[in-house]
Amino acid sequence: MTAPVQTLRLADAREAADLAAFLGRLIHYDRAAAVRLQAGGGALAVFGRPPSFEVLAIRTARLAEPGAEGLELDVTVSAGELLESVEGAELAVPAAVTGPPWTGVLPPRGGWRELPGLPGVPDMRGAVAAAVAEFRARDEALPQERRTRAERDRIGREIWSRSVGETELPLRAVHAAQSLGFLRPLPEGVRGAALLATGNWLRLRTPFGSIAVRTRGLGGLTVSPA
């Protein structure tokens, strides 16, 4: 393994455990996954892109080390190496890697506004379960001559591109949120999920992480050098 270039201390071991769980889920979908790290203002943001969902997943964690408020970090690294480095409340940032194209285009940091019409977390979990059941039923009903990857992909695109509630958020974003552990039951008194928008981006935000998706074209993107 390449020698680490920096060690970060998170606010507590629970923050580190949640981050490790997120990295593990990304690796489940892509063993060669890369993540982009950005630190600033006393917080660490980790961006990943699980294959097939066509979304960006974002997990944040509070930093606890002295001088964290002034720390600036922006680097793309191996998700697997980062996961291996987590120990207690600390993690060692591996050496930078050449990231895939998505790492150069991230959602804007500011300008987000909340949108109405998003169902509650239980309803979103139910919508995902119903969609999975529908896909399986339609797949099993296919005659043998149509049981192809292309036909299954067509069914999947039709189901997961549906909008959620009274919003433009595609169901695939909710599916990604559930698959990555972002739609867990909420502690009493904790605010649930919210839908935010800026430019051509939508962001499903929960206390456990966020899913960002572009709604159309390439306009309104913030491009930062990797």
Image (cartoon, rainbow, N blue to C red):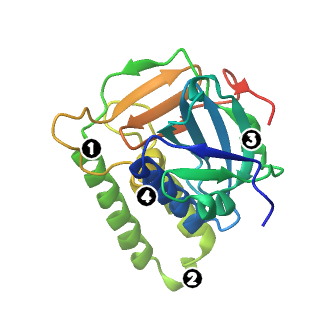
- How far apart marks 4 and 2 lie (CA) works out to 31 Å
Residue 156 percent coordinates (x, y): 50, 60
- How far apart marks 4 and 3 lie (CA) works out to 25 Å
- How far apart marks 3 and 2 lie (CA) works out to 48 Å
Crowd class of label 2 (few under 14; some 14 to 19; many from 20; radius 10 Å): few
- How far apart marks 1 and 3 lie (CA) works out to 33 Å
Crowd class of label 1 (few under 14; some 14 to 19; many from 20; radius 10 Å): many
Quadrant hosting residue 113: top left
Quadrant hosting residue 216: top right
Q: Earlier in the sequence, mark 3 or mark 2?
A: 3
Q: Earlier in the sequence, mark 1 or mark 3?
A: 3
Give the quarter of the figure containing the N terminus: bottom right
Given residues 216 and 176, the one toward you in this image is 176
Quadrant hosting residue 104: top right
Q: Which residue is mark 3?
A: 75
Q: Which residue sits at x=62%, y=60%?
A: 85
Residue 115 percent coordinates (x, y): 37, 21
Q: Which residue is mark 4?
A: 179
Q: Earlier in the sequence, mark 2 or mark 1?
A: 1
Under mark 2, the amino acid is: Glu
Under mark 4, the amino acid is: Ser
- How far apart marks 2 and 1 lie (CA) works out to 39 Å
Under mark 1, the amino acid is: Val
Residue closest to the far left: 188
Given residues 63 and 45, the one toward you in this image is 63
Q: Provide the secondary structure element on which disc 1 rests.
A: helix
The answer to whether one can see residue 224 in this image is yes
Give the mark toward the camera: 1 or 3.
3
Q: Which residue is mark 1?
A: 121
Q: Earlier in the sequence, mark 4 or mark 2?
A: 2
- How far apart marks 1 and 4 lie (CA) works out to 13 Å
